Image (cartoon, helix red, strand yellow):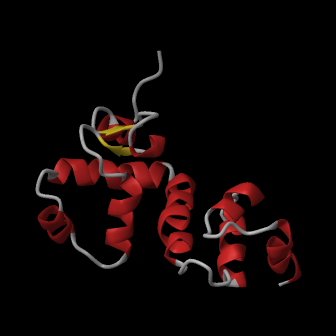
């Protein structure tokens, strides 16, 4: 049996994934608060104290576990931020900026995921923008 790392111990019991809750994304246990949403607030400059005011049911240990999960799985969380916030904030019906398509592909997202992230969904021809940029 492998010993738990300190990071794994911090995450255990505090971060969970459940298929039908928050789309199966990593979230704070017993809450519908995804780790990616907390990380995004941190990136926007909010302090832990500010985040705890925004989410009064969370604890400092929940945030520490969220930050540890992000350190352990940065690509997963960055992809979710791109899918849920970055691409999700392009107004419906407006062309997706090439830089946004490129950043999604640089994160390793599949063509299908990038296309589906926009409203209306992009076409394969739209994705050709990133290949020529």
Q: Is residue 42 left or right of residue 104?
A: left
Asked if 132 appears above or below 31 in the picture, the reply is below
At x 25% / y 43%, what residue is drawn? Answer: 31
Residue 110 location (% of width, % of height): 73, 56
Q: Is residue 55 visible?
A: yes
Q: Report which quarter residue 6 is drawn in.
A: top left
At x 52% / y 73%, what residue is drawn? Answer: 86
At x 16% / y 54%, what residue is drawn? Answer: 60
Residue 71 location (% of width, % of height): 44, 54
Which one is in front, 25 or 9? Answer: 25
Q: Is residue 110 visible?
A: no
Which one is in front, 112 or 6? Answer: 112
Residue 78 location (% of width, % of height): 53, 62
Asked if 34 appears above or below 21 in the picture, the reply is below
Q: Residue furthest top?
A: 1
The quarter of the image holding the C terminus is bottom right
Q: How many marks?
A: 0
At x 70% / y 74%, what residue is drawn? Answer: 101
Residue 41 location (% of width, % of height): 32, 70
Q: Report which quarter residue 18 is drawn in.
A: top left
Asked if 87 appears above or below 75 in the picture, the reply is below
Q: Is residue 17 left or right of residue 97?
A: left
Q: Is residue 6 left or right of residue 100?
A: left
């Amino acid at each position: 049996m492998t010993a738990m790392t300190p990071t794994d111990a911090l995450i255990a019991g505090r971060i969970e994934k459940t298929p039908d809750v928050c789309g199966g994304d990593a979230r704070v246990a017993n809450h519908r608060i995804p780790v990616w949403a907390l990380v995004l607030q941190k990136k926007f400059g909010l302090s832990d104290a500010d985040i705890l005011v925004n989410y009064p049911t969370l604890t400092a240990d929940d945030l520490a576990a969220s930050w540890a999960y992000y350190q352990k799985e940065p690509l997963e969380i960055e992809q979710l931020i791109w899918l849920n916030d970055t691409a999700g904030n392009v107004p419906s019906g407006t062309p997706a900026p090439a830089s946004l398509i490129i950043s999604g592909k640089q994160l390793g997202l599949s063509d299908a995921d990038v296309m589906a992230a926009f409203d209306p969904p992009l076409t394969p021809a739209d994705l050709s923008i990133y290949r020529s940029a």
